[in-house]
Image (spheres, rainbow, N blue to C red):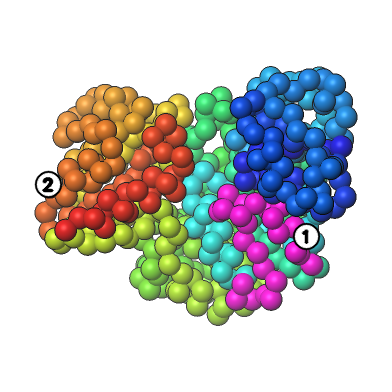
Amino acid sequence: MIGVAGLGKSGISAANLLLKNGEEVILFDSNKELDKNAILDKFDKKYQERIKIVLGDLKESDAKDMKYCVISPGIDLEVDFVKTLKSCNIPIWSEVELGYKYSKGDLIAITGTNGKTTTTSLVGEIMSNFKESAFTVGNIGIPYTDIADKTNENTVTVLETSSFQLETIIDFKPKISAILNITPDHLNRHHTMENYIRVKEDIEKNQDENDFCILNYEDAALREFAKRAKAKVIFFSSREKLGDGFYLEDGFVVQNKGGVVTKLLDTGKLNILGRHNHENVMAAMAISYAYGVPMDIIVNTCYNFKAVEHRIEFVKEVNGVKYYNDSKGTNPDAAIQAVLAMPAATYIIGGGYDKGSEYDEWIESFGTKVKKLVLMGATADKIADCAKKHGFTNIEKVESMQEAVSLCASEAKAGEYVLLSPACASWGMFKNYEERGHIFKDCVRDLG
């Protein structure tokens, strides 16, 4: 039997893939209040006799029957039932490892602290314009295991993968990997930056000289990592002129290949704002170039690409004030990029769940652009104290998104901006960043 721990979206998808391939599964969730019949109803009746459900505590007698256990990315590897699995020498797999085991064709895997969803979406669109069989999966919303049995030898799968998923890969080996950047995040889970960096770099650990790894030259840790990488490295840079790779020059993306510099793309024609998005575009171009996509397909797709929902997404203009939804800005570095992308005076709505982040650099990025900081959630006091330490005092705390939007609408003037960019996770007030973003958009659309 094979274990599946965590019965959310990725867990159910993983179990279905195993059942379709003739396996027996043990479904485990630490929530003992779940309804076993309701869980079974999520599966085809023809599979139900091959399902065993364990809720609450996982005993060694349950664990010892497992060949391996697929765990959901939200599960911390230090919880008790994982210790039980390890004591029984049960291999622990991530959902993306399982997807890799059962899928065919080529895999492109993208990770990084910020920019993953935008880059993955863009690469997915490029591949869809290049190949008949292309899938875009992972943290972007579709579990890898959902499509694994739909792939064939001519398929290319573009995967957004997180550090939580990379913690438990084994044979996972993309044809092309990409690490967009590494800045402090999830330190409540990984404890140290060294651990976090190591896990991100594991995306390349099974690659060889026939594969490619796309890296951000601006990240010092990634420049060091490139010296150890087994795959062929292609750099992109938003600040440096590279001797080899993709970089920005005078508003254009250019490529230097063997000393020959070619102007490829006018960033002024893109539909997405900010230097960080120009980095995302360069990463997507480098990935697609490494895969062999003709440059005209790459460039035309980039020009037609629209902003990903919840990532500096334009919502509406009300009384001359423009509202942007950056709910996916769940850490300070992402929130900094959103601030830098705003063209004029901005009201920021921030705060949320505390992941152990520090907010000094975010506050320092405000400069004279940010007029007011509206805070909510568990981190409101922590962020407010940090802001005051840096001399920013125009702060107001609110209890709901509706109150935050109404406050900003009452003060912002024509030509100014209101930006939801929380710098924090959504948990505690919202189910996820998507719900937070949708509620923000609803509140904005109700204005005027």
Q: Is residue 397 above or below residue 94?
A: above
Q: Is residue 70 above or below residue 54?
A: below
- At numbered mark 2, what does the secondary structure look like: helix, strand or loop? helix
Residue at horizontal 56%, vertical 69%?
125
Disc 1 crowd rating (10 Å Cα; few below 14, some 14-19, many 20+) is some
Left or right: residue 83 versus residue 260 is right
* Residue 281 place in picture, x, y as percent: 49, 63
Q: Can the viewer see residue 151?
A: yes
In the rendered structure, which amino acid carries the disc numbered 2?
Glu
Q: In the image shown, does 368 or 351 lie closer to the viewer?
A: 351
Residue at the bottom extreme, as displayed: 296
* Residue 280 place in picture, x, y as percent: 49, 58
* Residue 197 place in picture, x, y as percent: 59, 36
**Disc assigned to residue 411:** 2
- Residues shaded magenta: 128-152
Residue underneath mark 1: 149
Residue 26 on the magenta span = no
Left or right: residue 204 versus residue 400 is right
